[in-house]
Image: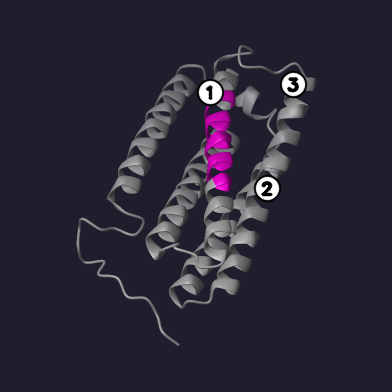
């Protein structure tokens, strides 16, 4: 079995390419600044933030964490199978990754529905302003990640595919960024305040 080899010691070629990592760092900085602001305002309005946090569904948040972590595991396997030129197995893991993302979207939509039905919106209070903006921005990233996953999977499974390992790694890097952001959002929003 032939395995693709890439020189990762070259700083100009991290897995997924330097441009993808620039995007990832910019996104992480953006989310990071918003989370610092959330913590700052939370320290100013501790009782409001605590009472608001109690209105979140921690079980939904924990289940969504499992969905995204599992999908990240499947994405790592998809990359490995692609490197081993096992396109069918890689595609299978891509589909499992997408399933985790879709399940995340379904559960997050259900959570949003319950919030809207309860009259909780962006202008309810400062905590929910952060909740809606941060989780909504993350949700957009998950949707974009799913589009990238679908596009890459379709490209690599077609006849005479020109999909390269760099494409698959860029896809994986973006998806793992979505995982990482959720792993930061979940405890800050659902557990700490």
Query: Dot 3: what SS?
Result: helix
Whole-percent x, y for residue 137 in the image = 53, 30
Q: Which residues are magenta?
A: 132-147
Q: Residue at x 72, y 41 (%)?
A: 107
Residue 65 shows up from this direction: yes
Residue 192 lies, with reference to residue 128, above or below; the image says below
Q: Which residue is mark 3?
A: 116
Q: Is residue 142 magenta?
A: yes
Residue 145 lies, with reference to residue 82, above or below; the image says above
Residue 47 shows up from this direction: no
Query: Dot 1: what SS?
Result: helix
Q: Nearer the viewer, residue 167 or 169?
A: 167
Furthest residue to the front? 160
Query: Dot 2: what SS?
Result: helix
Residue 70 lies, with reference to residue 34, above or below; the image says below
Count of numbered badges drawn on the protein: 3
Disc 2 crowd rating (10 Å Cα; few below 14, some 14-19, many 20+) is some
Disc 1 + disc 2, Cβ < 8 Å: no
* Left or right side of 113 for 69: left
Tell me how far mark 1 sits from mark 3, CA to CA. 15 Å
Q: Residue at x 53, y 58 (%)?
A: 155
What main secondary structure does the magenta stretch of the protein show?
Answer: helix
Q: Nearer the viewer, residue 96 or 164?
A: 164
Q: Which residue is mark 2?
A: 102
Q: Is residue 58 magenta?
A: no
Looking at marks 1 and 3 on the same chain, the residue that comes earlier in the sequence is marked by 3
Disc 1 crowd rating (10 Å Cα; few below 14, some 14-19, many 20+) is some
Tell me how far mark 2 sits from mark 3, CA to CA. 21 Å
Q: Which residue is mark 1?
A: 130
Whole-percent x, y for residue 154 in the image = 58, 57
Tell me how far mark 1 sits from mark 2, CA to CA. 23 Å
Please tell me the numbered disc located at residue 118: none
């Amino acid at each position: 079995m032939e395995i693709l080899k890439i020189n990762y010691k070259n700083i100009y070629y991290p897995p997924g390419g330097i441009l993808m990592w620039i995007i990832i760092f910019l996104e992480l900085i953006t989310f990071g600044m918003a989370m610092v602001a959330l913590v700052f305002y939370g320290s100013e309005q501790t009782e409001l933030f605590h009472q608001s946090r109690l209105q979140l569904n921690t079980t939904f948040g924990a289940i969504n964490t499992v969905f995204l972590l599992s999908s990240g595991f499947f994405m790592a396997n998809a990359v490995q199978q692609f490197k081993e030129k096992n396109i069918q197995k890689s595609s299978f893991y891509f589909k499992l990754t997408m399933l985790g993302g879709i399940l995340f979207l379904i559960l997050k939509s259900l959570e949003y529905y319950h919030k809207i039905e309860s009259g909780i919106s962006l202008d309810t209070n400062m905590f929910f302003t952060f909740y809606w903006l941060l989780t909504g921005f993350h949700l957009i990233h998950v949707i974009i990640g799913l589009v990238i996953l679908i596009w890459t999977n379709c490209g690599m499974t077609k006849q005479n595919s020109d999909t390269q390992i760099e494409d698959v790694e860029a896809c994986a890097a973006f998806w793992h960024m979505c995982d990482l952001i959720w792993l930061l959002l979940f405890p800050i929003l659902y557990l700490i305040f």
